Image (cartoon, coloured by chain):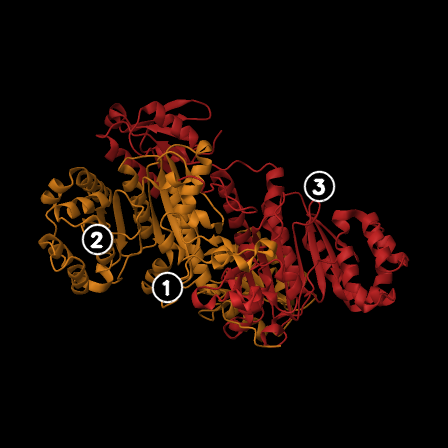
Chain colours: A orange, B red
């Protein structure tokens, strides 16, 4: 009776305690910062109707969706593969948010500032650093056209990076309307713009040469000079861009200058006319967070004013972003995150007679806010000390007959091996003290 | 372009901000208490191979599983419905834990105390209070046969209830070995025991009459007198039970007496020979938490010493439990949970000229640990005050030209309507003060 796999399916992951504790700590930080900015928590189900997930972009998204098989009588193979499923796992948090807002707008404040942290699933080929189940951390503001929404969501994420003591990111800004105006100026036909954007979106990963080759092929060799210069990293002339798309550029400059003013020199803010951000629902500013030494982004977002319309409601201006949690974790690990801490102490059990006293002491210490492990079961003290090491406890405590009689414990600091007797009254303070 | 649903699929739920905040607070409490007991966090994927999920109990579990359709070439309709899926959503956290432990045991401490909080999915008929996606909060100890594991996991959950200021639960205890010994004593044939346990498991919901009718039918009218008395709620004679299953009863009494000793009169602990707890992988003690006024349980668990064997590893003694999070939330809501708090203050924006000062002030207050919303965009003060009400801010702050010149803000407490000028230096203290 073997043959049952002990590994998760390809692209899915187990998390060992240290990693899980670190991930939990980062999620707590993101939650705290988002809340400090006045964003309200929301949650939606993992599973949505396929009609919600596919929408107009059907073709592209459909490939990403893990579909859930119909059941019982509803499952009718004679209807063909297209009729085997009517629900799927969400592949992002933005579509569910648009559905959620369309349903609940009547009871939500206007504007509505929401954050949503949860897993999404994508049926992509699993590869290093790309998983089929991963966490996104979104913050959005719905119901306001103000460019201050962009400033607010970007500021919140800058505070997240700062709280996580990461090196300051670079925020790259663009506006879809500027991209379209440039396409007009470059006389790029409507039917080639999608492919052009897809090519430009690869600049960061594929580099300018490969991308320019693609674009050259797409445009029959006629690459506009500006586009070539932008792709090669040449600095854009903002004055010229302002003439091309005045409204979009005014917004971008306001976002940039506001963020610079608020930054206290943490982070850089630059306008780049080649930034695309894949999703086709963006309608205005788009932006992306980059960390030095990391290719690709650790998050990004933009304005998507039309998305709620597909649910039949009125047009709702909206702007939001997503932190790429898995890439953020990579950055945190590379920056050398502090190892997760084990319990403050592991309390050994000297004998069955003394167990009640140990359990009582554990209860009191836990009530004082400490993390206390008690050795489960009975074993030699040596095995119990080994266990205390294994769970990375800071102290191993022994409450033997002598200690019990004297109203104290023997406390061994496992990192140093130093031992001392501590009175029960002084014990909480010792366990709460910072390690030397 | 309507017709796209705005409601989630049947049995799945959206959570509005208040509800989401309350759920988050309860999960934080459970996490904190589990950690205070020295349990380590783990996580496993939502999706497992069907071979992991189905196992020997295939038939029963299979009905519960949301299966994920194979994709591309792997999807071959000619192979029949049984070959359309090879993965599914997990329906509990115990099977994934057994897989996880079988895979990672070499790098985990022995015994291993783990907790796992996450969603599970069950394709059951959706009905009031029963959902198709819901959260479980499990704590388990693997690798120890000691009855002190049962005491530890139950104590941890008692602390959870106490921290949540819920009325004290009753913990009902039984042991599968006692149940089997009673069946021997009652001469109930092996092939009828499964059905008998299923009938007994319904006692709490269906009541003694219905259950005794079922049992009478099952046993051809010969209901053992003890069984009839137990089902009718008669107190079990523990001395007699001790003769029936000495080892099991010794364990149960030790669990009960230890918990009583540690309880400080919070909670009741009773031994009931009719408690079954459905899952057939239990091998020793089983237990369940009940709250007055709630039918059914708010959690439970037991010892399952054989479960890791199905993954080909050595037999690992194990014991664990699950808090039924959705039922716990019902109980908390019935007990009258405090409404979720909005931001400490909503900072209005008086004019574009003063916006930078407002944003700067918000940044400083957030850094001081406060939750500060800034009105996104520009609007009349009246609209901004309405927004502050809508997000349930405690204070609405106005920083107009007079206030800016005087280094203060106008602070209106929204619950009382009381207004006063506060210096910027005193503002953090005011916002942190407890409401009167």
Q: Residue at x 83, y 65 (%)?
A: B183
Q: Chain of mark 3?
A: B
Q: Residues within 10 Å of mark 2 (few under 14, many from 20)?
A: few
Q: CA distance from mark 2 to mark 3?
A: 66 Å
Number of numbered discs overlaid on the protein picture: 3
Q: Is residue A131 above or below residue A26?
A: below
Mark 3 secondary-structure assignment: loop
- The location of residue A236, given as percent across then percent down, is 12, 50
Where residue B308 sits: x, y (%)?
61, 71
Give the label, 1 or 2, closer to the camera: 2
Q: Quadrant of the N terminus of chain A?
A: bottom right
Viewer-closest of A341 and A182: A182
Disc 2: which residue: A192
Tell me the element at label 1. Answer: loop
The residue positioned 79% from the left and 56% from the top of the image is B274
Q: CA distance from mark 1 to mark 2?
A: 29 Å
| Snapshot quadrant of residue A386 | bottom right
Residue identified by numbered label 1: A130
Q: Is residue B364 found left or right of A392 in the rendered image?
A: left
Q: Is residue B249 visible?
A: no
Q: Which residue is disc 3 drawn over? A: B293
Residue A243 x %, y %: 11, 40
Q: Report how far apart the C-alphas of labels 1 and 3 lie in the structure.
A: 48 Å
| Mark 1 Cα-neighbour bin, 10 Å: few <14, some 14–19, many ≥20 | some
Q: SS class of the residue under badge 2?
A: helix
**In the rendering, which numbered label is found on residue A212?**
none
Q: Chain of mark 1?
A: A
Q: B75 and A21: which one is in front?
A: B75
**Mark 3 packing: few (<14 Cα in 10 Å), some, or many (20+)?**
few
Mark found first going from the N terminus, 1 or 2: 1
């Amino acid at each position: 009776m073997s043959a049952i796999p002990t590994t998760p399916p390809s692209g899915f992951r187990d998390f060992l305690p240290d990693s899980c504790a670190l991930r939990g700590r980062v999620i707590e930080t993101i939650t705290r910062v988002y809340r400090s900015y006045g964003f309200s928590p929301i949650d939606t189900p993992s599973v949505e109707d396929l009609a919600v997930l596919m929408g107009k972009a059907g073709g592209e998204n459909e490939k990403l969706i893990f579909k859930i098989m119909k059941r019982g009588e509803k499952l009718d193979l004679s209807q063909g593969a297209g009729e085997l499923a009517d629900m799927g796992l969400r592949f992002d948090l933005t579509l569910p948010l648009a559905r959620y807002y369309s349903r609940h707008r009547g009871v939500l404040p206007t504007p509505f500032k929401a954050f949503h942290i949860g897993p999404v699933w994508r049926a992509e080929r699993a590869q290093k650093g790309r998983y089929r189940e991963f966490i996104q951390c979104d913050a959005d503001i719905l119901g306001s056209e103000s460019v201050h929404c962009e400033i607010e969501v970007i500021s919140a994420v800058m505070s997240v990076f700062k709280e996580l003591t990461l090196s300051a990111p670079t925020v790259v800004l663009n506006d879809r309307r500027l991209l379209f105006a440039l396409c007009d100026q470059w006389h790029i036909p409507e039917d080639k713009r999608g492919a052009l954007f897809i090519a430009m979106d690869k600049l960061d990963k594929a580099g300018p040469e490969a991308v320019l080759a693609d674009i050259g092929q797409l445009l029959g060799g006629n690459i506009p000079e500006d586009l070539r210069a932008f792709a090669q990293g040449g600095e854009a002339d903002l004055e010229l861009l302002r003439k091309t798309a005045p409204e979009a550029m005014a917004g971008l400059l306001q976002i940039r200058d506001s963020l610079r003013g608020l930054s206290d020199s943490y982070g850089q803010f630059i306008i780049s006319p080649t930034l695309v951000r894949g999703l086709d629902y963006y309608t205005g500013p788009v932006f992306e967070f980059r960390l030095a030494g990391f290719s690709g982004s650790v998050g990004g977002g933009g304005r998507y004013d039309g998305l709620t319309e597909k649910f039949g409601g009125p047009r709702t201006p909206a702007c939001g972003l997503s932190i790429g949690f898995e890439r953020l974790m990579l950055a945190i690990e590379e920056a050398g995150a502090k190892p997760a801490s084990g319990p403050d102490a592991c309390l050994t059990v000297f004998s069955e007679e003394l167990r009640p006293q140990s359990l009582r002491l554990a209860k009191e210490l836990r009530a004082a806010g400490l993390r206390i492990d008690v050795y489960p079961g009975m074993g030699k003290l040596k095995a119990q000390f080994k266990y205390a090491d294994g769970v990375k406890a800071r102290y191993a405590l022994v409450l033997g007959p002598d200690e019990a009689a004297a109203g104290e414990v023997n406390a061994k600091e496992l990192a140093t091996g130093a031992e001392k007797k501590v009175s029960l009254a002084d014990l909480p303070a010792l366990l709460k003290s910072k390690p030397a």
